Image (spheres, rainbow, N blue to C red):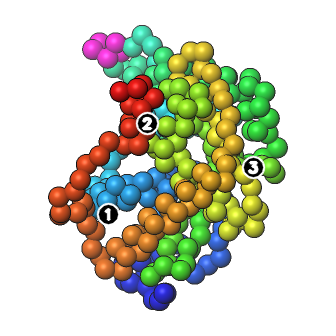
Amino acid sequence: MTTETSPLIDAIREKAGIGKSAPRSCYMPMSDYHAHPSISKSRLDILHQSPAHYKYSLEHPTEPTDAMITGSVFHKLVLEPDTFEDEFAVLPDGIDRRTKEGKAAWADWQAENAGKTAIARPTLVDLQGMANSVHSHIRASSLLSDGVAEQSLFWDIKGYSVPIPVKCRIDYAQARCLIDIKTTVDARPEQFGRSCWNFRYHVQAAFYSDAYKFVTGEDLRFVFIAVEKTPPYAVATYMVNEAMIEQGRREYQRDLEVYAECLSTDIWPAYPDKIQEIVLPIWAQDEESRNGY
């Protein structure tokens, strides 16, 4: 394959600030990481739907959703609790913004917490319960010790029609494995396995594992800590097996092939124009067989 770059990829690489420099690992604020233009696994998920969806998402950025904000709060409570108050502020109770006094109190609170993300107290109570459950879980707490939280990795993937600048942010890295924390409705193996498929966690596991090995030279196993969103905030830990990693690797590599082609041609297609056959997913067909229909 040729490694000539297109003007578009050159612009992305220049903005990314890595160009032809060596791969790197560093800590940076989450906002800076998200602003970095290298492609991430979450962006690959959008591209996986279609290149047109990916291009639209870049051209029409949106504000963080409530789910994104609560996810950031939860990760901060679990991984970096000492700096929680630097980034987040709990919305005050008992302020009636319809009154003169209430408006003044609200203005004071906003001034005191300028630049911080506001979080409602009931939401914080739930998230603290989830974080406490992780910290009190014997296996999960041991996984989150003697390591480094929130490492950002940047590197170029070559071998496609153009080199591709990519990034990832690892929740926690320690000597034995890489750890990612997931919130979920149901942390039991079969149910969380479906979440892995639906949200492409297998792709994340492969993408992050390969990134860490490329940047640091260390080949580590990948572990998920799954914590339920509702009381009693049950926790389970799962080691990703090699078959799951291999499937995730094949999927992200196919995504990158599509991405490289789009960058080279500046053509970002949506869905095929032809009429396609629709079938039930395999798990639905299997469920019918199990129920004897």
Query: Can you give x and y, in whole percent of width and height, for residue 29 in the image?
Result: 57, 50
Which label number is shown at residue 51? 1
Mark 2: few/some/many CA within 10 Å (<14, 14-19, 20+): few
Give the mark, 3 or 2, whose residue is nearer the N terminus: 3
> Would residue 215 be found to the left or right of residue 163 on screen?
right
Residue displayed at 17% across by 58% down = 275
Instruction: Give the spatial CA distance, label 3 vs label 1.
Output: 33 Å
Q: Does the magenta stretch include residue 98?
A: yes
Under mark 3, the amino acid is Cys
- Residue 70 shows which numbered tag? none
Residue 73 located left or right of residue 77: left
Q: Is mark 1 on a helix, strand or loop?
A: helix
What range of the chain is rendered magenta?
A: 96-102
Q: In this view, does 247 lie to the left or right of 139?
A: left
Q: Earlier in the sequence, mark 1 or mark 2?
A: 1
Looking at marks 3 and 1 on the same chain, the residue that comes earlier in the sequence is marked by: 1
| Residue at image point 34% right, 73% down | 262
Given the image, on which type of amino acid does mark 1 rest?
Answer: Pro
